[in-house]
């Protein structure tokens, strides 16, 4: 796990992906690789010998095949232009000699093949297919988070230098793993650390929150912990706004097939609602 992977496309979030990946690359002292994936497109058939009743329409199918080939070539060229523009932006941010990779195929499968060398994946919250509706997240974002066993930073369209972060802490084993990952990683060291537990206050919950706070303090974090009641998503959103939080840290989805089909999880809801970057940790 050595490389920060910045996944770019033609969406407005690609500039922010570059900026956040540059920030992460410096803090992790890790090299940065830009990745652009060309999704496979069904091609028109080129072997027409078995077509029934083709007759004079043979040239039409050949024209379709030629058109597909031209589209593929233009897509490759556009992707190269995107990568060159991204490398220029990173150069202005002080990132020396970032690598760039263009691959063909399904986005999730392509990123999975790079998983072993991935230390952090940075991806835009909204892709090219999201339109201008804020609640619409990129079609692959949830699948990427579920599939990759690596930290994923999901970013909005605009970059804001992180100064503080909030851990959505619920006392679960997953939440404790999030704390352990932060203790071990230099990514967020030096930033103000907030922990928020939403739910009925109890001695056990308070003990779990105190334990997590102590772990983070021993690792050098300045921490602020709070418990409250209410709707989890509403309280997380309200706290981020009131405390000017720049980054939200949450446990990622589980990888069991049962959990993959759960609907209405806090993770999915915050992906749709949050205006700050979300760091998903397994």
Image (tube, helix red, strand yellow):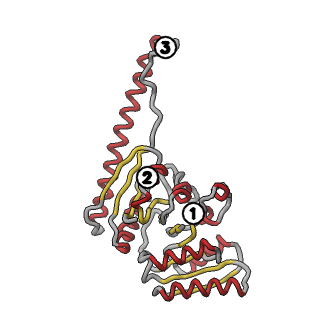
Q: Which mark is residue 113?
A: 2
Q: CA distance from mark 3 to mark 2?
A: 41 Å
Where's residue 116, x and y in %?
A: 42, 59
89 with respect to 129 (left or right)? left
Question: In the rendered image, which residue does mark 3 sit on?
Answer: 54
Viewer-proximal residue among 232 and 185: 185
Q: Residues within 10 Å of mark 2 (few under 14, many from 20)?
A: few
Which of the two labelled residues, at mark 3 and mark 2, occupies the earlier sequence position? Answer: 3
Which of the two labelled residues, at mark 2 and mark 1, occupies the earlier sequence position? Answer: 2
Question: In the rendered image, which residue does mark 1 sit on?
Answer: 271
Where's residue 241, x and y in %?
A: 56, 76
Where's residue 213, x and y in %?
A: 56, 86
Viewer-proximal residue among 180 and 65: 180
Q: Residue at x 27, y 64 (%)?
A: 91
Q: Quadrant of the N terminus?
A: bottom left
Q: Residues within 10 Å of mark 1 (few under 14, many from 20)?
A: many
Q: Quadrant of residue 251?
A: bottom right
Q: Residue at x 71, y 78 (%)?
A: 199
Indicate which label's residue lies in the foreground, 3 or 2.
Answer: 2
């Amino acid at each position: 796990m050595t490389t920060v992977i910045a996944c770019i496309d033609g969406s407005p979030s690609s500039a922010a992906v570059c900026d956040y990946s540059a920030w992460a690359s410096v803090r992790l002292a890790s090299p940065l690789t830009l990745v652009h994936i060309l999704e496979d497109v069904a091609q028109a058939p080129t072997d027409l010998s078995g077509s029934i009743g083709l007759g004079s329409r043979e040239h039409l199918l050949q024209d379709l095949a030629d058109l597909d080939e031209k589209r593929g070539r233009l897509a490759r060229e556009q992707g190269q232009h995107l990568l060159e523009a991204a490398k220029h932006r990173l150069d202005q941010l002080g990132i020396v000699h970032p690598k760039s990779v263009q691959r063909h195929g399904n986005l999730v499968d392509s990123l999975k093949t790079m998983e072993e060398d991935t230390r952090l994946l940075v991806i835009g919250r909204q892709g090219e297919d999201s339109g201008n509706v804020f609640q619409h997240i990129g079609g692959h974002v949830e699948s990427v988070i579920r599939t990759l066993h690596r930290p994923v930073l999901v970013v909005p369209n605009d970059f804001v230098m992180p100064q503080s972060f909030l851990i959505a802490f619920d006392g679960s084993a997953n939440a404790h793993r999030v704390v352990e990952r932060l203790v071990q990683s230099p990514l967020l060291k030096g930033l103000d650390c907030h922990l928020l537990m939403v739910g009925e206050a109890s001695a056990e919950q308070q003990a779990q929150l105190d334990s997590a706070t102590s772990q983070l303090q021993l690792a050098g974090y300045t921490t602020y912990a709070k418990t409250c009641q209410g709707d989890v998503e509403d309280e997380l959103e309200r706290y981020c706004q009131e405390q000017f939080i720049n980054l939200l840290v949450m446990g990622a989805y589980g990888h069991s097939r049962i959990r993959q089909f759960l609907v209405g999880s806090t993770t999915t809801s915050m992906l749709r609602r949050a205006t700050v970057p979300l760091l998903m940790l397994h």
